[in-house]
């Protein structure tokens, strides 16, 4: 579904992603694929390469066997790859509903209209209601997003990701900064919105990884050192070493 | 119950809105009887100019200090079309506005890659470049003399009467107001407001951020161009002053005084400054700049949201309703430079460059 070939990203000579030979990552259709690794391993950079937020220094990225290397983030988004952000990035002054409307607008021909009333976004009302109910925000549609609780903001973030019915979800630490209760609710939510979609997620919380991921890929110093099921990867000596090494340092 | 009250309040707001619009339209129609007619035309032109800056600054968060380029280019193009080609003045103004928009395309393509103060500086630099070109290219622009004696012809009517011209200008400017209002309250306007807050997020949703920025810039230039054209026909002359950076500064001052992100505040700001400058010019006070500056500082000291912002806040308090606008509206921008989006954009550098 999503595949990289010898992918490398360098920042001024520093190889953030790539290691010796570049990263070959393969995400199968319909699976939930977690990227894990110690801080600075290049997870977020790899994530930004997949979503088009960064262009790779070398290597290729394929989406359903179509090469998407170097395409801008908005084009990749319109090809059906939706990403969430680690830092909650809702628009404080907008209503909850209008976040979902805005997401749907990006995929609609209305998006370039400038002599049409904003009321035309009413065309999305049905889908917007449906999505908000799915993430449990149905009763808060007219609330200002800035007034939501932290967990609700993260739920709104997921509503924006899933609204336009993308084939691939890229979730950047969906449980970052959450307490146990919110984490459980988020795991439940992600399972609910998944459907047949493919999910790639960056996650620090191993419990979340264990519950959600079909496949786990471990990055260390920009290199993909292991990829497999959670239990396989957990017992991989290189992985143990990477984690213990990171902890010791 | 709450729904009913909301609906009622929305309806009351709508009625109040129509009443305000009606009162404004009546005042606009009567204006040349209230003030000296050429001054009334100036108010119209500056109001649309300030509004064009407000679209960009107040809504999309881009403070252009180069709008004199669009006002001036259009003024010259309007004047040349009327003098050299003898086209009727409404068409000449359209030629001017289109010229301004065309000039804005390359400037916009470069400028939208920068943010905050850098955007402001880049637009200023381009405007000054055009100013120098116009100064040197005197065979076309008349150099220091500018363009003189611009005809004001249209279907053989007599347009020398400033009352008559005022009402023609009002119609043209009103169309400009409508385009400005409609576009900020359009789907595109929603995207612009959102990308001002978080461009990286908007890009990830699937919007081409640069394309929206360029579009806003060109649309704004087109409206600034209509304003410059109306002004040129009104004065029947164009001078280098119209391209000078102080013209941009004046437009920004009007937009900020009236209240940014309000659109109609620009009309109030323009009326206030034009009338104040006219009063000072005839009053014999010499330090006109100091007086204008002091008024500017005082108003912003007491009303951070500008005049329109202060009035609408007072009205809302009077009605006991908080903001119940159906539309998404950004918070009013203070006089300071908008927050730089450089940090958010830093992570996405180079992604859209192709």
Image (spheres, coloured by chain):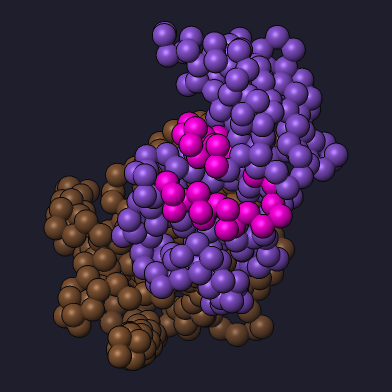
Chain colours: A purple, B brown
Residue at 57% from the left image edge and 58% from the top image edge: A192
Residue B174's x, y, as percent?
49, 77
Residue at 25% from the left image edge and 60% from the top image edge: B305
Residue B108's x, y, as percent?
59, 44
Query: Relative to B133, is B186 above or below?
Result: below
Residue A212 shown left or right of residue B299 in the figure: right
Observer-nearest residue: B248 or B21? B21
Residue A29 shown left or right of residue B293 in the figure: right
Residue A31's x, y, as percent?
70, 43
Determine if the magenta segment contains residue B292: no
Query: Relative to A248, is A106 above or below?
Result: below
Image quadrant holding the C terminus of chain B, namely top right
**In this view of the protein, can residue B160 be seen by the observer?**
no
Please provide the residue range marked out in magenta.
A183-211
Observer-nearest residue: B300 or B43? B300
Q: How many numbered marks have been drawn onto this rendered protein structure?
A: 0
Q: Quadrant of residue B158?
A: bottom right
Residue at 50% from the left image edge and 67% from the top image edge: A132
Main SS category, magenta section: helix
Determine if the magenta segment contains residue A192: yes
Image quadrant holding the N terminus of chain B, namely bottom left
Q: Quadrant of residue B324?
A: bottom left
Observer-nearest residue: B132 or A248? A248
Residue B53 shown left or right of residue A56 in the figure: left
**In this view of the protein, can residue A175 be seen by the observer?**
yes
Observer-nearest residue: B101 or B279? B101
Residue at 54% from the left image edge and 36% from the top image edge: A209
Residue B65's x, y, as percent?
43, 44
Q: Quadrant of residue A146?
A: bottom left
Query: Relative to B32, is A240 above or below?
Result: above
């Amino acid at each position: 579904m999503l595949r990289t070939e010898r992918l490398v990203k360098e920042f001024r000579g520093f190889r953030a992603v790539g290691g010796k030979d570049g990263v070959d990552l393969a995400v199968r259709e319909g699976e939930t694929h977690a990227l894990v690794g110690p801080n600075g391993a290049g997870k977020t950079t790899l994530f930004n390469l997949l979503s088009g937020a960064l262009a790779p220094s070398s290597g290729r990225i394929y989406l359903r066997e179509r090469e998407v290397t170097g395409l801008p983030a908005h084009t990749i988004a319109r090809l059906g790859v939706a990403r969430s952000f680690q830092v909650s990035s809702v628009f404080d002054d907008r209503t909850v509903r209008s976040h979902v409307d805005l997401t749907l607008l990006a995929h609609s021909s209305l998006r370039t209209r400038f002599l049409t009333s904003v009321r035309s976004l009413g065309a999305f009302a049905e889908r917007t209601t449906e999505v908000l109910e799915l993430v449990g925000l149905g009763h808060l549609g007219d609330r200002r997003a800035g007034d939501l609780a932290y967990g609700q903001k993260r739920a709104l973030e997921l509503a924006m990701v899933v609204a336009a019915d993308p084939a691939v979800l890229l979730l950047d630490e969906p449980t970052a900064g959450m307490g146990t209760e919110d984490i459980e609710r988020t795991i439940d939510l992600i399972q609910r919105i998944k459907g047949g979609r493919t999910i790639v997620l960056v996650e620090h919380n191993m419990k979340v990884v264990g519950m959600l991921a079909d496949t786990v890929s471990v990055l260390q110093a920009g290199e993909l050192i292991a990829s497999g099921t959670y239990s396989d990867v957990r017992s991989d000596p290189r992985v143990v070493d990477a984690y213990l090494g990171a902890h010791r340092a | 119950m709450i729904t009913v009250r909301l609906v009622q309040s929305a309806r009351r707001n709508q009625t109040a809105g129509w009443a305000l619009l009606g009162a404004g339209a009546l005042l606009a129609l009567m204006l040349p009887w209230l003030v000296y007619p050429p001054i009334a035309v100036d108010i119209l032109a500056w109001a649309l100019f300030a509004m064009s800056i407000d679209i960009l600054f107040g809504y999309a968060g881009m403070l252009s200090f180069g709008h004199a380029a669009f006002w001036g280019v259009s003024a010259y193009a309007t004047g040349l079309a009327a003098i050299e080609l003898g086209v009727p003045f409404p068409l000449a103004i359209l030629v001017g506005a289109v010229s301004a928009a065309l000039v804005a395309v390359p400037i916009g393509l470069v400028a939208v890659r920068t943010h905050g103060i850098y955007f402001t500086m880049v637009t200023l630099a381009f405007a000054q470049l055009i100013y120098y070109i116009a100064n040197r290219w005197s065979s076309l622009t008349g150099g220091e003399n500018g363009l003189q004696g611009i005809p004001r012809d249209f279907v053989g009517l007599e347009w020398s009467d400033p009352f008559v011209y005022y009402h023609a200008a009002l119609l043209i400017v009103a169309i400009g107001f409508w385009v400005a209002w409609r576009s900020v309250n359009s789907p595109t306007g929603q995207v612009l407001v959102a990308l001002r807050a978080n461009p990286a997020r908007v890009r990830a949703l699937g919007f081409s951020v640069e394309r929206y920025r360029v579009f806003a810039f060109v649309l704004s230039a087109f409206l600034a161009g209509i304003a410059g054209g109306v002004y040129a026909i009104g004065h029947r002359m164009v001078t280098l002053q119209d391209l000078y950076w102080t013209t941009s500064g004046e437009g920004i001052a009007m937009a900020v005084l009236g209240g940014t992100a309000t659109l109609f505040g620009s009309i109030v700001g323009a009326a206030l400054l034009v009338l104040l400058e006219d009063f000072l010019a005839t009053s014999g006070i010499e330090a006109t700049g100091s007086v204008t500056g002091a008024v500017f500082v005082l108003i912003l000291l007491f009303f951070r949201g500008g005049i329109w912002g202060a009035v609408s806040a007072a009205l809302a308090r009077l009605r006991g309703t908080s903001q119940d606008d159906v539309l998404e509206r950004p918070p009013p921008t203070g006089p300071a430079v908008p927050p730089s989006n450089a940090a958010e954009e830093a992570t996405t550098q180079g992604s859209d460059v192709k």
